[in-house]
Amino acid sequence: MPSFIKAESFKLSKKLKSWLGPLLVMVLVLIAFPLSIDISQYDLDKFYFSIIVVSLLMTAFVATEGMFEEDFEDGSLEQEFLKEKDFYKLVISKIFVYVCFIGMPIAFIGALFSFANGVAIGSFGKVFLLLSLSNLLLFNLFAFGNALSINKGAMLGVLSSLPLALPVIILLGRAIRSIQYGDGFVAVTTLMVGIGLIVSAIMPLIISAALKTHID
Amino acid sequence: MKLFSAQNIAYSINENKLFHNLSFEINSGEGLHIKGGNGSGKSTLLRIILGITSPSKGSIQSYEPDLKISYLGHKNAIKSYLTPNENLELLFNGVELNHAFEWLNKFGLSHVQDELTASLSFGQQKKLALIRVLAQSSDLLVLDEPFVGLDQATADQLNSFLAQKISQGGGLILTSHITPMIDCEVLDLGVKNA
């Protein structure tokens, strides 16, 4: 597994567009969205979270767009299948690297921008944790969508997997309310960690099966 | 030593039979040259032997569960946004990486080792893909049209490597329109008519 993570980290670090693009989209949306709507500065701290949910969804969407497509197109998936007979390790490593390289910086940017929008400084850690967990879930779901339609333009599959992101958004909304009103943050975060662990273990199996059908 | 055997395998795409009732064996120290016209199913047969594609009928039996296979398919499995050096470092380490760099010199790619692979010619990319296969220690080489895009000097180097591999007890399966200069069994899939 460490060799997979090392290889995927190296590949992603060389693809500037793949990791820098989503970060720039996140910054752009977080700056442009509050400017484009007429919200009283006194209410911005309340509205900010709905902005961040939309930004998170968009950036996770953009970040996972070409996750498996390149490996499929250049024949790396076939080589991987010959070595490992399935793609579980590859998928789990790829999602891990994407969450670390893209998901967590996005969460950091989101938490950082929350100060500028009136959210209490003491909530930085909570916001960062929630956004990181949400990204973990979203990256798993969109990776599945990507794997589904790898030979038909991966964006189509990511789009079709959008409804799966609704429960994550609902959960994130509940977690955000817990920050705003200081109620039940630990419980909802624990729930997100639990779901994150389950999804991270099961989704790579499903993605692996989807990728196998594409190379057959 | 027997590596693989195929019993009555057939493959069809939408009612069209690519091939049927093919039976053969692959042993160590032997080569198998699969030939046939365009669309006759050579590449599909390779993928069936490797277990990537399932046959419509029949079965492939592997006798060596831990068999190390090196495969070069139609797709090169090299990263266009990396340099040749980075591609090799991504795939190999230790002794295999040294072998890979030796092949890079033998194939005359050392002067482009730090350029992006995307900027290399088709033939240079093919050589890089071949290095991926040749530098690996493997019991069986499976090559799909390995001579396409190669200049004569590189084709000769490849032929002598394959002959050496067979003489050392390795197995070889290849498809090629160009008859290889090595002693191989021939499996002819014929010409696929419309």
Image: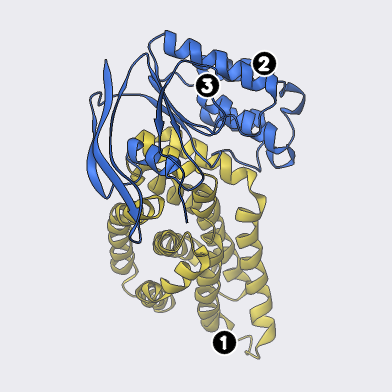
Chain colours: A yellow, B blue
Residue A148 located left or right of residue B81: left
Spot occupied by residue A172 in the image (x, y as percentages of width and height): 40, 72
Q: Nearer the viewer, residue A15 or A38?
A: A15
Task: Give the mark, 2 or 3, whose residue is nearer the N terminus.
Answer: 2
Q: Are marks 1 and 3 in contact (CB under 8 Å)?
A: no
Residues at marks 2 and 3, CA–CA distance in whole angstroms = 12 Å
Q: Work out whether A40 lies above or below B193.
A: below
Q: Identify the mark at residue B106; answer none if there is no mark.
A: 2
Tell me the tag on residue B134.
Answer: 3
Residue drawn at x 50%, y 71% is: A57
Q: Nearer the viewer, residue B177 or A96?
A: B177
Residue type at mark 3: give it. Answer: Leu
Residue for badge 1: A43
Look at label 1 and name its amino acid.
Asp
The total of numbered circles placed on residues is 3
Query: Label 1, label 3: how many angstroms apart (C-alpha)?
Result: 65 Å
